[in-house]
Image (tube, rainbow, N blue to C red):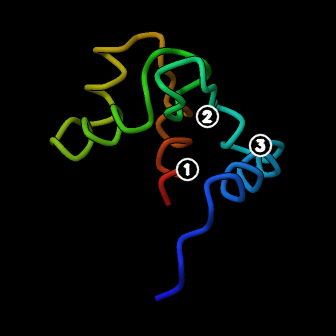
Amino acid sequence: MGAMPKPDYAMKAFEESRMTGLATRITIDPNQMHGRPCIRGLRITVGDVLAMLAGGMTREDILTDYPYLESADIDAVLDFAA
């Protein structure tokens, strides 16, 4: 198994991919949520959505509980986590 990339390399790779598709919905700001990846600058993290999905919530459940999220945000979370 190869070594994990250094955080600065991973951040650079992510920044380069921001111009493509779903990755534009994920923001990383060191001054927000301790630098954890968030959805469109909102204070809901990729990890929050993944935990909800892992806990058995459906896409529809999440969108009902968080009406400011969009279905494409959940797609972006899954794309980012892949």
- Location of residue 69 in the rendering, given as x and y in whole percent from the top left corner: 47, 19
- Outermost residue on the bottom side: it is 1
Q: CA distance from mark 2 to mark 3?
A: 8 Å
Marks 3 and 1 close (CB-CB < 8 Å):
no
| Residue at the image point whose x is 56% and y is 34% from the top | 72
- Mark closer to the chain start, 2 or 3: 3
> In the rendered image, which residue does mark 2 sit on?
26
Q: Secondary structure at mark 3?
A: loop
Q: Position of residue 77 (x, y in %)?
A: 49, 42
Q: Residue furthest top?
A: 67
* Mark 1 or mark 2: whose residue is earlier in sequence: 2
**Amino acid, disc 2:** Ile
Q: Residue at x 60, y 26 (%)?
A: 30
| Amino acid beneath label 1 | Phe
Above or below, 81 relative to 67: below
Q: Amino acid at mark 3?
A: Arg
Q: Secondary structure at mark 2?
A: strand
| Residue holding disc 1 | 80
Q: x%, y% of residue 6?
A: 62, 62
Q: Nearer the viewer, residue 53 or 3?
A: 3
Residue drawn where x is 61% and y is 34% of the image: 26
The image position of residue 52, as x and y in percent, is: 25, 35
User: Which residue has dot 3 on it?
Assistant: 18
**Would you identify the image quadrant in which residue 61 lies?**
top left
User: Alpha carbon of mark 3 to alpha carbon of mark 1: how far?
Assistant: 11 Å
